[in-house]
């Protein structure tokens, strides 16, 4: 009589349990780091979009030889988007070409760029001169509505202030960013 040996393959229950414990440990170690990475990515993305919008406003002002501005808007994605004094930039913003060069957004002004709401996790803290808008004249300088040079730092924070960046707008229109 011949005896046949069956060859079995697979994992034992102990091998499977050890593998799951090792994988669980790796995930437990990596998950908090991944969360911080995602927060840093969100603050960087928002800051870059804000800086892009400022550069767009400035370059359009120089190109069109007329003023251009960036202002907070609670309905930035709507067809009838408008600037909202007292609103936060975290609700969204628009970049516009000031067709009549009066220093304000009016119904006839062209909207050049729109940014949607950033959500509740973000806080923008502009100085008083930039609370309602950041305006560039035809030379690309940052000016007030009365065409006086202005500069300031807009703080952008995320997750209750644990992560943040500063966007600095100088009177000559230069825009830079730095960590808080």
Image: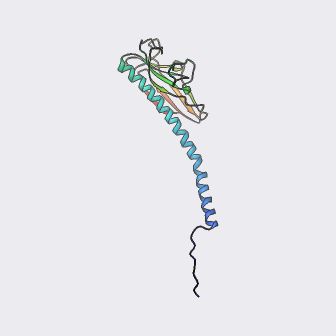
| Residue under the point 39% across and 19% down | 61
Relative vertical location of residue 74 with respect to residue 159 in this rendering, above or below: above
Q: Across the whole image, how many numbered discs are drawn on residues? A: 0
Determine if residue 174 is in view.
Answer: no
Colour convention of the picture: rainbow
Relative vertical location of residue 118 with respect to residue 65 in this rendering, above or below: below
118, 177: nearer the viewer = 118
Residue 37 pos. (x, y %): 54, 43
Residue 6 pos. (x, y %): 57, 77
Q: Quadrant of the N terminus?
A: bottom right
Q: Is residue 108 left or right of residue 122?
A: left
> Residue reaching furthest bottom?
1
Q: Quadrant of residue 112?
A: top left
Determine if residue 33 is in view.
Answer: yes
124, 83: nearer the viewer = 83
Residue 122 pos. (x, y %): 57, 31
Residue 172 pos. (x, y %): 41, 21
> Residue reaching furthest front?
1
| Residue under the point 42% across and 26% down | 55
| Residue under the point 52% across and 23% down | 78
Q: Quadrant of residue 11?
A: bottom right
């Amino acid at each position: 009589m011949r005896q046949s040996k069956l060859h079995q393959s697979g994992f034992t229950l102990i091998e499977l349990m050890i593998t799951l414990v090792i994988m669980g440990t790796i995930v437990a170690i990596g998950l908090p780091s991944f969360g911080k990475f995602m927060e840093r990515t969100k603050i960087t993305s928002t800051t870059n979009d804000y800086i892009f919008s400022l550069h767009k406003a400035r370059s359009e002002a120089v190109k069109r030889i007329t003023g251009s501005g960036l202002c907070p808007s609670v309905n930035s994605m709507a067809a009838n988007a408008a600037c909202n004094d007292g609103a936060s930039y975290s609700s969204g913003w628009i970049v516009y070409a000031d067709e009549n060069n009066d220093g304000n957004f009016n119904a006839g002004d062209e909207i050049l760029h729109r940014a949607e709401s950033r959500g509740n996790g973000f806080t923008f803290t502009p100085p008083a001169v930039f609370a309602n808008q950041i305006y560039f004249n035809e030379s690309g300088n940052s000016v007030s509505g009365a065409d006086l040079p202005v500069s300031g730092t807009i703080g952008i924070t995320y997750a209750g202030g644990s992560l943040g960046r500063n966007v600095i707008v100088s009177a000559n229109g230069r825009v830079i960013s730095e960590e808080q």
